[in-house]
Image (cartoon, rainbow, N blue to C red):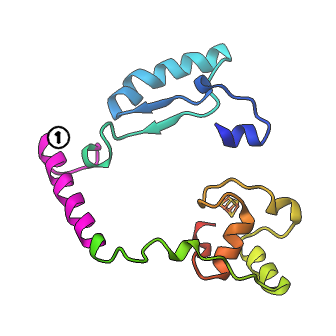
Amino acid sequence: MQQFRRFGVPVERADIPRVEGASEVYSEYFPILKEDIRRGQAPVLVDILNCLHGCNVGPATTHHLTRYQIDRAMDKRKKAQIEKQGQQKKGLFSKGKEPFDEPTREEAERIWQSLHKPTEEERWINCQCCGYGVCEEMMRAIYAERNHQRLH
Ligand code: SF4
């Protein structure tokens, strides 16, 4: 919603509904959406998730586990990962807090080009999808080898 507002598109919560689960999406929501479109009053963006209970129970899954069995397996896996990461924890998140080195103008320009942002105007379109607040931070993170261009 903030992204729309940033670009001057006025939206309310109702303009961006979220619908989950194949049966609700295809059987219930789409016919209603069709009606809204016919009336000329429809959402701006529909966030549709095929999987009702997350990826583990989505329509493309091939297992025959119950929800309870999946939840148990996920708890077990999460616990194992936390224990594993805990052993390597020291310094795990501290690297990202160190200040970035400053690229030279030429180096910055090379990275801007690789990000497909050749103009100043484009460099201020900060969608935040990369996790950085502004494109400039992403550019500097790439320079510091803390990120790469694959997102673009
Ligand atoms: S660098 Fe980040 S904030 Fe800028 S356009 Fe790309 S994804 Fe969005």
Asked whether, in this view, residue 8 is left or right of residue 144, the answer is right
Residue 66 at least partly seen? no
Residue 1: give x, y in percent of width and height: 64, 36
Q: Which residue is under mark 1?
A: 67
Q: Specify the quadrant of the image occupied by residue 108.
A: bottom right
Q: For mark 1, give the secondary structure.
A: helix
Numbered circles on residues, count: 1
User: Residue placed farthest to the front in the image?
Assistant: 90
Q: Amino acid at mark 1?
A: Arg
Residue 106: give x, y in percent of width and height: 83, 86
Residue located 16% across and 57% down the image:
76
Q: Is residue 30 above or below residue 134?
A: above
Q: Main secondary structure of the magenta part?
A: helix
Q: For ligand 1, give the image quadrant.
A: bottom right
Q: Is residue 32 magenta?
A: no
Q: Is residue 141 above or below residue 122?
A: below
Q: Which residues are magenta?
A: 58-85
**Residue nearest the observer in this picture, 27 or 73:** 73
Residue located 72% across and 63% down the image:
135
Q: Is residue 65 above or below residue 141?
A: above
Asked whether, in this view, residue 129 is left or right of residue 136, the answer is left
Residue located 47% across and 25% down the image:
30
Residue 86: give x, y in percent of width and height: 29, 70
Q: Is residue 76 magenta?
A: yes
Q: Is residue 57 above or below residue 117?
A: above
Asked whether, in this view, residue 8 is left or right of residue 46, the answer is right
Q: Specify the quadrant of the image occupied by residue 112.
A: bottom right
